[in-house]
Amino acid sequence: MANMKKLKDIARRVRLSKKTTIIIIAVVVAVGLIVGGTLLYNRFVGNIFGYNFFGVDRTAMVVGGEIVTQKEISRVMKEKEVDTIAYFSKTYNATTANTDNFWFTAFGDNKERPIDYLKLISADEAARIKIKQIIAKADGLIQDISYATFLTDFETEKIARQDPNKKVAGVRNITEVYYFREVFTKLEDRLKQAMMDDGTLKVPTDTSTNYYKDNIKSYKLDDSMVLDMVTGTLKDASRKVETKLFPDYTDQEKAQISAEIDKISKEIAKGADPTKTCEKYTSASSVYTYSYFEMTMDQEFIGRDPDSYKMYADLVTNAKIGVWNPAQFYDQIGINAIMLKSRDVQGYISYQDALPQLDQILSKQLYEKYFDSQLAQYKANGKVSYDWNIIYGSKLRSDGSY
């Protein structure tokens, strides 16, 4: 009897185990169907309709063994949108303003559509970016080039910049596109410098000399100038204009001050003492004050205050030396008559002095050509694979419109 009872207990446990096993198998199968169904949905249906279940970010490309996701393609598309519009405007005179359904309209004999062009150039640009990241990682300039790590850093930085107590050098409310460009530009600067240092981007001497000769006008030194000026203001300068620099002149006041400044400048032109002439017109009964001053804008001045130099230089671009211009109101400096007293033509920056700037310009050109070549080599060696179904499913707009 005892043995029979043991056998019954064993049989009952076996039956329970069978039930448990069946339940476990059923659960595993159900989970498998859900996961498999989701993957199939994302792979096929999602590709047709341009979106995916549960927001799964799919692999759009593999570059040198590194994954480029669909969302990365979308981010690049946002940067390339302007280039695409510019291309179709120049090539077909077609813009978003003059063409209904612009992105899906076929233009020209080749039936080019902006949406296709955008995704083609974005895919290549995404590959080029990834190659730059791969080389930067190999040089020890960055540790992790995955999109997942970038997104984590982006979310962390986005939250940090909202702290009102934190000093922020750039924009506080950042987007993914803005943050990527900010971070990647800094990485590119370091990568380009490293490539210059190791000789990868060595600019040949004949290249820099020829560029200097071909663009010599860009290296013209600013002319040194001396200006004579007579200015007039209200003695009561309590009223302020939009510029917050000068009294709020009425048209009548502007006309009266300008007329008297012209009288002063004419007397000075005939040999009268500038300072005493201004004092004469600034009588006790006058509500206006007139002043004369000489402004010397030499190379030291230009280096110290290039913006002011440009402003005054623009005012006397076509001026003749020794001739007073009629008085007028300038937003930045008030009512003035100006005379160009002298202009010293400075010539051009020497090749040797221009060399650092030339190296920067030409090394940047070599940098871009280098990575164009790298992309071509990666493609030729089968190191770039595109999943065009997923790339085509990438969306430019967050609302999924295209």
Image: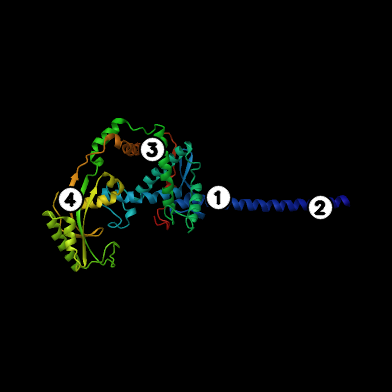
Count residues near mark 4 (Cα–Cα under 10 Å), then give few for <14, some for 14-19, many for 20+: many
Q: Residue at x 38, y 50 (%)?
A: 79
Helix, strand or loop at label 1? It is helix
- Image marks 2 and 1: residues in contact by CB distance under 8 Å: no
Q: Which mark is residue 340?
A: 4
Q: Position of residue 127 (x, y in %)?
A: 42, 42
For marks 2 and 4, give the one nearer the viewer. Answer: 4
Count residues near mark 1 (Cα–Cα under 10 Å), then give few for <14, some for 14-19, many for 20+: few
Q: Which residue is mark 1?
A: 36
Identify which amino acid the numbered label 3 is placed on: Phe
Q: Is residue 179 visible?
A: yes
Is tag 3's residue or tag 2's residue first in the polypeptide sequence?
A: 2
Is tag 3's residue or tag 4's residue first in the polypeptide sequence?
A: 4
Helix, strand or loop at label 4? It is strand
Disc 2/disc 4 C-alpha distance (Å): 115 Å
Nearest the viewer among 280 and 261 is 280
